[in-house]
Image (cartoon, rainbow, N blue to C red):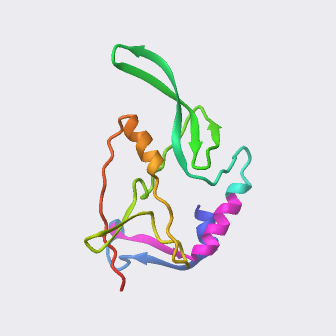
Amino acid sequence: MGQVADAAGIQFRMLNSAKGPAVRGPRAQMDRDLYQQGIQKALQELPNLWLVEDGVDDLMLEKINQSNDDVEERVKGVVTSSGREIQASQVVITTGTFLRGMIYQGPDIRIPAGRHMRDTAGLEPPAVGLAQTLERCKFPLVTTRRSHFPS
């Protein structure tokens, strides 16, 4: 990430440079498109890494122990939004900000969505299936609201 950030950087500066060393910190601004292209290229060139660009709607679980009302399960893969099953002995879940994402417009309009897509009027979809899966697995889910007003 650091090498790609250096290559895509358009501004580099040190924050709080007039203050003591304990509060100084580097800041870098990247060209978004160059950074995205650089990261994609770097990932594609890594050996033993298989990239799939899709959302995850469900976890594939297998029961390994059951006693009374308690069921112990182990992950054995994921089901993507396109219905593809991918076997995996371990899964890292990064929910981002779209878990049951909702866009509010005024007091009455609610649109299930993620963020606005760049350079279009389109919206990215929310992760509804994954939210339902995590609730079914008894993970606590918390919703936060953020307001961004156009300038």
Q: Is residue 58 left or right of residue 7?
A: left
Split into 4 quadrants, where in the image is the N terminus? bottom right
Q: Position of residue 139 (x, y in %)?
A: 36, 38
Image position of 95 with respect to 133: above or below = below
Q: Quadrant of residue 68?
A: top left
Image position of 9 with respect to 61: above or below = below
Instruction: Please give the name of the residue rendered at 31% of the width and 71% of the height, measured from the top-left corner.
Output: 147
Question: Residue 105 versus residue 17: which sits nearer the camera?
Answer: 105
Residue 139 lies in magenta, yes or no?
A: no
Specify start and end residues of the magenta stretch as a single range. 23-42
Residue furthest top in the image? 67
Q: Position of residue 136 (x, y in %)?
A: 39, 36
Residue 33 lies in magenta, yes or no?
A: yes
Q: Is residue 41 left or right of residue 60?
A: right
Question: Residue 115 versus residue 20: which sits nearer the camera?
Answer: 115
Q: Is residue 142 left or right of residue 40?
A: left
Split into 4 quadrants, where in the image is the C terminus? bottom left
Instruction: Please give the name of the residue rendered at 45% of the width and 67% of the height, measured from the top-left corner.
Output: 115
The rendered magenta stretch, by its main secondary structure, is classed as helix
Instruction: Please give the name of the residue rendered at 69% of the width and 46% of the height, measured from the top-left corner.
Output: 49
Q: Position of residue 127 (x, y in %)?
A: 46, 53
